[in-house]
Amino acid sequence: MLPRFGCGGVAAARTRPVVPAILNTLPPLWADGDSLYEKQPGAVVRPLRPNHDPRSCFTRNACSIAPPLSWRVRRSDSRRDTIRHRLFQLALTVLDYDKAIAFYVGVLGFTLIEDTDLGNDKRWVRVAPPGYDAENPNGAALLLARAVTDEQRASVGNQTGGRVFLFLETDDFKRDFDLYTSRGVHFVRAPAEEPYGTVAVFADLYGNLIDLIGPRG
């Protein structure tokens, strides 16, 4: 004789239900308002009794509670809702501060945000693309870090092992492509139309690859 399963003593008319593995991780308190779970918008839930455990009635006929896949875990710490993270700076190893500034500021049109002497021939040099707001940063800046060890010097021009290092968005692709070309920027890949926009790839003074990306033409 097959075991009887059901809700609140109501026998199920079918064979043993197959309970999804995910339900085995749910605690009994899931229909309670103080539990770790809350209903997604639109979910239909009618618990038969307080603190009802859905794992005991995952059948079609014997239960009047919706499958728990429409529920999600509530964050245990409400403060997480207010936490925000952002990438505000990337380090780029260079051989010479001034030559790197000449390229990124003089050729690409970046803004020199900071150039502070730290002593011992070390400087804190930060540059950012046009449109960067230093007071309310809306993107990432570049920290030009002079390589001083053999290991660091080996990374110059090879920040990402030959992959594209930076993705530079522009509101006018043709304007910037023509400007960079006139200033001698070496494009290693001609402009092409991609699903995400018009893109061309160029190299910086050390060979790091950068995508120039604009709206589709």
Image (cartoon, grey):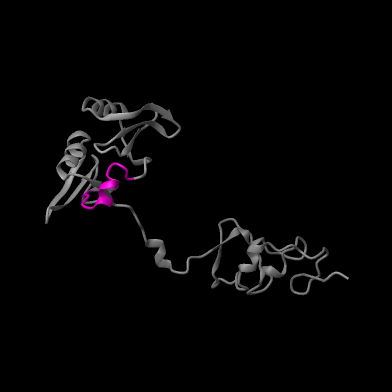
Q: What stretch is highlighted in magenta?
A: 144-159
Position of residue 11 measured from the top left corner of the image (x, y, whole percent): 81, 70
Instruction: Identify whether 122 is placed above or below 173.
Output: below
Instruction: Say if the magenta span includes residue 154.
Output: yes
Q: Indicate the quadrant containing the C terminus: top left, top right, bottom left or bottom right.
A: top left
Q: Which of these two is toward me, 139 or 152?
A: 152
What residue sits 60% from the left and 73% below the top? 29
Residue 36 location, quadrant: bottom right
Location of the N terminus (image quadrant): bottom right
On screen, residue 15 versus residue 193, left or right, reads: right
Residue 137 visible in the shown view: no
Q: Position of residue 169 (x, y in %)?
A: 32, 37
Question: In the rendered structure, does residue 27 fall within the stretch colored magenta?
Answer: no
Residue 100 against residue 68 in the figure, above or below = above
Viewer-closest of 16 and 103: 103
Q: In which quarter of the image is residue 215?
A: top left
Decide which of 69, 207 is in the foreground and name it: 207
Indicate the position of residue 40 as horizontal and vertical percent values.
Answer: 56, 58
